[in-house]
Amino acid sequence: MTEISHYSQVWSYRTPRGRLALWGAWLALVALFVFCWQVMTKDTIWFFVTDAPRQAADIGNRMMPPRWSYLPELWAPLWDTINIATLGTIGGVIMAVPVAFMAARNTTPSARILRPLALFIIVASRSINSLIWALLLVAIIGPGLLAGIVAIALRSIGFVGKLLYEAIEETDANQIEAITATGASGAQVLSYGIVPQIMPAFWGITVFRWDINIRESTILGLVGAGGIGLKLQASLNTLAWSQVTVILLLILATVVLSEWVSARVRHAII
Amino acid sequence: MLILDGLSKTYKTGDAALADVSLTVPKGQILGLIGPSGAGKSTLIRCINRLVQPTSGKVLLGDVDLVRLGKADLRRQRRRIGMIFQEYALVERLTVMENVLSGRLGYVPFWRSFLRKYPPADIQRAYQLLDRVGLMAHADKRADALSGGQRQRVGIARALAQDPELLLVDEPTASLDPKTSRQIMRLLTEICSERGLPAIVNIHDVPLAQQFMQRIVGLRAGRVVFDGTPEQLTHEALTTIYGAEDWNEMRRGDQEQTNAEEDARNRMAALVQ
C-alpha cells in the first residue's frame, strides 16, 4: 500500500455526543435499578421471605396428590367457560367489524366525527381488563354466564377492532381503485375490493382472540361471572388444595388445546 | 369519441400535473401516451374516469361531460370506460371468473354481486372473454396463482366485461418481460380493432409504442408537446418530450434485445427438435 490517499481511515457509528448520551443513559438505568431495589426491600419482612421455600413445599404437599374424583363436577363449569369465550368472541367480533370500518382511514364515512369516536371505543375497550368489565357487569346485570359473555365481548371489541382496522388500512389501493373504475357502488367496492383482502386477517384475529378469551374466561368466575373460575374460587376458599390442582391442570389442558386449535386454523387460512 | 377540452389538474401540493390538455380520440383509434415519469400520464387517464378529480376543463365521452357528474351518474358513466392497470390490479384472492365478472358490478344490484349470482348472459359473456384471451382453463383458479402475462389478460377481460366504449390503459406492460409485453400489446390492439374501441395507452417503452400505436401523444410537465403518427416521432420530437438523450443508442439497444430474444428462441426451438 504505497498509494497515498486523502480519505480518512477513521469512521465511527456514533458521534461523540451520541456516545456520551448512551453512556449516561446506561448510568441512569443502573442508578434507577439501585433505587428501586432499596424501595422494594425497605418494607419487606424478611422472615416471611426466608420462610417461603417451606411454605411453598407445604402447599405443594397439600396439593398433591390431585383429587381426581373432583373432575366430574368440573365438566359443566368448563363447558360454561368455553361458551363464555366463544359467545363472547362472536359478540365482540360482530360489534368490532363496524367499529373497524369506521376507524380505518380509507373506509371511514367521516374522518371528523365517526373516526375519533370509533378510535375512542377501541381504546376504552382495550384499557379495561375483562376482569374489571366482569366486575362491573356482575354488579349491573347480576352474577352468571351473561355477565361473563358480555365482559368478554366488550373487551374483545378493542382488540379485534384495532387489528382489523389496521388490516383495512393496509389493503392494496390498486385493487380498490380497479373495482371503483368498473362503476361499482360503495357497498360493492367494499365487498369486492376490500373484504377479500382482509379475510385472512379477519379469521386469524378472530381465532386468536378466541384463544385469548378461553384463558381470560377461566378466571372470570373469581368475580362471580360464571364458569370454572367459580369452582376455583370455592376450592380456594375452603383451602381444598388438592381440588385446586385438578382445576389448574384442567385449565392448562384447555388452554393448550385451544392454542393448538387456533394455531391450526390460522395456519390453514394464511 | 372522446374529447378532452382544456383539462387541467393541480394537486393540493400545488403541483400542476396537467395544464390545459386538449385531445380528440375518434372511434377505433389507439393512442399511445408517452412522456417522462411525472409528466402527468397517469393523472390524465385517471381524470377521464375521475379516479382523479380534474381541477378544470371538460371530458366529453359521446355527449356526456364526465367532469360535471354527480356520484350516481358518475358510476353509471364509469361502466362505459374500461381500465387496465400497470400491476394488473386484480383482486388477488378472488378467482379469475370473479375478477372478470367484477367488470359487471356497475350493471348488477348489490345482492347479485354479493351472492355471486350473476345473470346468465353475463356469465356467458365472461366465458366468451376468457376464451378470447386464452384463459378458459384457468377460470376457477385464484388470480394470484397466475403468471404476470396471464393476470394482465384477466385484467383485459375484466375491462371488456364492462362493454366499454373506451379503454384506458395504464402502463400495461411495465411489469412484464419483453416478449410477454409484445403479446399483451398485440392482444390489446387486436381487440380494439375487432370492436372499433378507442384506447388511450400510457406507455413507457417508446419502441413498443411505435410498434403498436396508431397515434402518439407526448406529454411533458403536464402539457402536450407532441401529437402525431409513430413515423413522425423523430429524434427531435423525442428530445422535446424527454430532454436530450441519445435515442439512436436506445433504439440500437432495443434492436439488440430483439435480436437476443430471436436468438434465444431459435436455440430453444433447436433444443426441442
Image (cartoon, coloured by chain):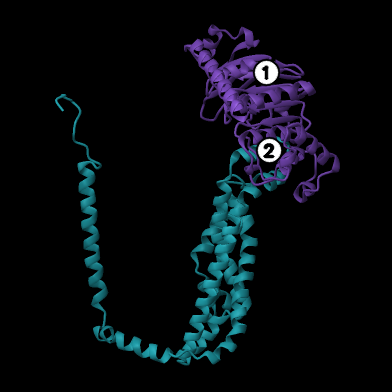
Chain colours: A cyan, B purple
Q: Indicate whether A9 appears above or below B19.
A: below
The residue under label 2 is A180
Residue A191, percent from left and from top: 69, 48
Instruction: Give the amino acid at mark 1.
Output: Leu
* Picture layout, residue A18 above or below residue B28: below
**Judging from the image, what secondary structure is the residue with disc 1 in?**
strand
Q: Are marks 1 and 2 in contact (CB under 8 Å)?
A: no
Instruction: Estimate the x, y position of residue B139 in percent, counting from the top left.
Output: 73, 42
Question: Hey, which quadrant is residue B186 in on the image?
Answer: top right
* Label 1 vs label 2, nearer the camera: 1
Chain on which label 1 sits: B
User: Which residue is most to the front?
Assistant: B273
Expressed as whole percent of the image width and height from the top left, the position of residue B112 reads 80, 47
Number of dots carrying numbers: 2
Q: Which mark is residue A255?
A: none
Judged from the image, the secondary structure of the residue bearing numbered disc 2 is helix
Residue B95 quadrant = top right
Dot 2, how many residues are within 10 Å of its Cα: few (below 14), some (14-19), or many (20+)? many
Q: Residue at x 51, y 10 (%)?
A: B248
Instruction: Say which of B8 and A266 sits in front.
Output: A266
Instruction: Name the residue carrying label 1.
Output: B31
For the C terminus of chain A, the image quarter is bottom right
x, y percent for residue A265: 59, 62
Which is nearer the eye, B179 or A156? B179
Quadrant housing the N terminus of chain A: top left
Task: Mark 1 vs mark 2: tell me if same chain.
Answer: no
Distance between the alpha carbons at the discs numbered 1 and 2? 24 Å
In this view, A114 is above or below B78: below
**Quadrant of residue B109 in the image?**
top right
Between B158 and B261, the one lying in front of the other is: B261
Looking at numbered disc 2 in the image, what kind of residue is underneath it? Thr
- Label 2: chain letter: A
